[in-house]
Amino acid sequence: MAVVISSNGNSKAFDAKMTVYVFICVIIAAVGGLIFGYDIGISGGVTAMDDFLKEFFPSVYERKKHAHENNYCKYDNQFLQLFTSSLYLAALVASFFASATCSKLGRRPTMQLASIFFLIGVGLAAGAVNIYMLIIGRILLGFGVGFGNQAVPLFLSEIAPARLRGGLNIVFQLMVTIGILIANIVNYFTSSIHPYGWRIALGGAGVPALILLFGSLLICETPTSLIERNKTKEGKETLKKIRGVEDVDEEYESIVHACDFARQVKDPYTKLMKPASRPPFVIGMLLQFFQQFTGINAIMFYAPVLFQTVGFGNDAALLSAVITGTINVLSTFVGIFLVDKTGRRFLLLQSSVHMLVCQLVIGIILAKDLDVTGTLGRPQALVVVIFVCVYVMGFAWSWGPLGWLIPSETFPVETRTEGFALAVSCNMFFTFVIAQAFLSMLCGMKSGIFFFFSGWIVVMGLFALFFVPETKGVAIDDMRDSVWKLHWYWKRFMLEEDEHDVEKRTD
Ligand code: BGC
């Protein structure tokens, strides 16, 4: 079965079908997202397991047993937070190496390297007999995340036909959300397996890592990466295979043209600092900052406490994680369905208003009704829980997936892997900041934290309104002419470059 992709708006569109082969490639590559999601979801549960704490963090375990309980401060512990966030620091560093392997070796080998890092990391962490093995395992998992998150979104954006690029790229985020959900379920069941439940939980990431390793032998390299590395014949053949049509000349020529231009750029990082790179660079970096300052990871973490307050008792952790996790997965489908229809801007703007209302309602109820050691009344707690779920929905179809999609589709080929590497590391940095600081912020700011995130949501909504142009349906190597040159603000940087080129030619 094939869907014919036709021309769209004012941008160039190339003949392409949605082939079964592309579908398989998308699913296999997106398994990288599954491992990322699993790693995000698993650490919270494992660090709450007494067997794990007794083995590696005995002092934390002692303190936990004698802790003076306080609604906002009971989880505050810098040392433990560092265990969780070390993965993001390692991923931050790794994404720069991954950018080099993506350019020099290709997207596919970079995914294979990711799966090898994952496998060794899982082995060390799950089999750890001392804190060093555990931390080195965690760092190698971080390398896997750095390599995987660099290669997978780029791969997806490059093999997808332009008209379906948004939806196919969001399969990555879908897998992230499924990974988080699976991790939460695994956490629940393994927490009652003593004394080695945590080993099973950490070892679980080995399954998708193996799928990625073997699956990546079946998938192709992207045409852009092949042509970029002078494998033009193979590039054209791959293009025919993934597009499902014989006549790919036009698209092929546009990639060759983009790659020829890219070859003239000797130092991509210097090029990234030039005015012409300003639009994708500024947007790519800020989207990462904004994605984390929506407060999503904070909300996800706080959910179990809130759900417990509604009276879910002992099953609170499972229920809250499963409910928010399931909503996260299902709402991502809405994103997949809408992103190439309504476009990116609509989703960013709609969800900014949507998430702002949720954060404000939650903040107001907690400020009014929750005292430091007391609990919320049942009706208020129920309203809070409902708004947490509605908030997660909004994130799942907008800032979550678009934080990965937009930077992967807006950089020109000459700075694509480097620009995206900076975006990935920026994401990891702010995830680290939130993971490290959130519990202390919650303890210090109390319900004010929800107003803090609300403020950022207003800023990001305004940014999207004025500075994020629509990229729906535009061919990935045609952003300059079809997007930046037409944008009210960003076009000045393009004109600056054109004038500079003319001056150089007339010199
Ligand atoms: C973000 C993660 C977040 C997840 C939630 C991802 O896009 O990068 O930080 O935990 O979405 O689904």
Image (spheres, rainbow, N blue to C red):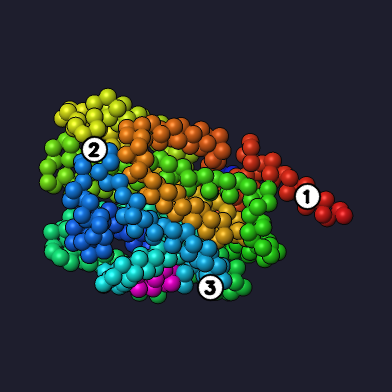
> Which tag is nearer the camera, tag 3 or tag 2?
2
* Residues at marks 3 and 2, CA–CA distance in whole angstroms: 50 Å
Residue sitting nearer the eye, 379 or 440: 440
**185 relative to 124, above or below:** above
481 relative to 362, above or below: below
Q: Amino acid at mark 1?
A: His
Q: In the image, is 310 to the left or to the right of 290?
A: left
Q: Position of residue 258 (x, y in %)?
A: 64, 60
Beta carbon at label 1 within 8 Å of ligand 1: no
Circles 3 and 1, Cβ within 8 Å, touching? The answer is no
Where residue 20 appears, as percent x and y from the top left, is: 38, 64
Q: What numbered label is drawn on residue 500?
A: 1
Label located before the other in sequence (2 or 1): 2
Residue 220 at least partly seen: no
Image quadrant where one finds the C terminus: bottom right
Quarter of the rendering containing residue 194: bottom left
**Neighbour class for label 2 at 10 Å: few (<14), some, many (≥20)?**
some
User: Mark 2: is the Cβ under 8 angstroms from ligand 1?
Assistant: no
Q: Quadrant of the N terminus?
A: bottom left
The answer to whether 57 is drawn above or below residue 490 in the figure is below
Q: Residue furthest top?
A: 368
From the viewer's side, name the closer residue of 429 and 501: 429
Position of 466 compared to 310: left or right? right
Under tag 3, what secondary structure? Answer: loop
Residue 71, numbered label: 2
Q: Position of residue 425 (x, y in %)?
A: 49, 56
Mark drawn on residue 105:
3
Q: Which mark is residue 339?
A: none
- Name the chief secondary structure element in magenta: helix
Give the magenta-colored segment's residue range. Answer: 111-122
Which residue appears at 27% of the width and 46% of the height? 75
